[in-house]
Image (cartoon, rainbow, N blue to C red):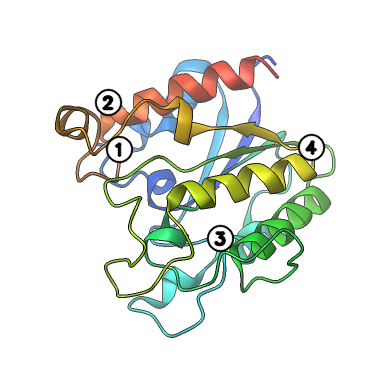
Amino acid sequence: MELKGLKINFLGDSITEGYDSSDLEHCYWGLLEKNDGVIARGYGIAGTRIARQQSMFIDPKWDNYFRTRVDKMDPDADVVVVFGGVNDHGHGDAHLGNMSDRTDDTFYGALHLLYQDIIKRYPGAKLVVMTPMRYEDEDALVNGFGIRKDGPLSAYRDAICEVAEDYDIYLLDIYNKCGIDPKDPKLRREFTSDGLHPNDAGHAVLYRLLREFLMGI
């Protein structure tokens, strides 16, 4: 796929918001705009999840879960990229659920409804889903807020892959292809700011993976 001139909407969380990149030009989608002539629109909100929060949380904006924001994005996109899931594991309280769910209140169900909404709103666009980056506490079964999880981050990655395959959606498996494991102290220092959020070097890795993937579509 020729990248120059493509209109791409990026729906995500703090990584897509550009948290801890030096500026949006160094965010993974900003690099696509700067280097490849993509018309990139970032719709990242820090702390947000794919599934709906079940109880009151620290910051109300964190419950702007992804599906509530689909109709707020520009309507003329050629490509829509969805990049999330780490917060569902990190501090969300919705259950993982299973493949038969069709509700915002489980991760599986929210994925189904999110993809259905995007496909309906952007019938001529290509939908690309990126699995979450690995992070320092990805194996935790009780997160930092005392919320018990149904599995490690890899279980959320697997759910994203399973539902994307069901809808024949383009899938970029960042979790396995990124190569940044923050549990390695050297990689943590070089590519992240805190064991979770990529710094400029980490965003450059995401950019290269996404650029190569888009060009291959």
Q: Amino acid at mark 3?
A: Ile
Looking at marks 2 and 3 on the same chain, the residue that comes earlier in the sequence is marked by 3
x, y (%) of residue 211? 53, 20
**Quick check: 204 above or below 131?**
above
**Quick check: 209 above or below 141?**
above
**Disc 4 crowd, CA 10 A, few/some/many (<14, 14-19, 20+):** few
The image quarter in which residue 114 lies:
bottom right
Can the viewer see residue 25?
A: yes
x, y (%) of residue 38? 57, 25
x, y (%) of residue 157? 53, 45
- Tell me if label 3 and label 1 are in contact, CB under 8 Å: no
Cα–Cα gap, marks 1 and 2: 7 Å
Circle 1 SS class: loop
x, y (%) of residue 67? 64, 62
Can the viewer see residue 84?
A: no
Residue bearing the label numbered 4: 168
**Disc 1 crowd, CA 10 A, few/some/many (<14, 14-19, 20+):** many
Circle 3 SS class: loop
**Disc 3 crowd, CA 10 A, few/some/many (<14, 14-19, 20+):** many
Task: Return the mark for residue 198.
Answer: 1
Residue bearing the label numbered 3: 50
Q: Amino acid at mark 2?
A: Ala
Cα–Cα gap, marks 2 and 3: 26 Å
Circle 2 SS class: helix
Query: Extreme bottom residue here?
Result: 56
Looking at marks 4 and 3 on the same chain, the residue that comes earlier in the sequence is marked by 3
- Tell me if label 1 and label 2 are in contact, CB under 8 Å: yes
Q: Write the residue at 35% across / 30% down.
A: 203
Q: Left or right of 8: which side holds 121?
A: right
**Quick check: 47 above or below 197?**
below
Q: Quadrant of the N terminus?
A: top right
Q: Write the residue at 37% across / 34% down.
A: 27
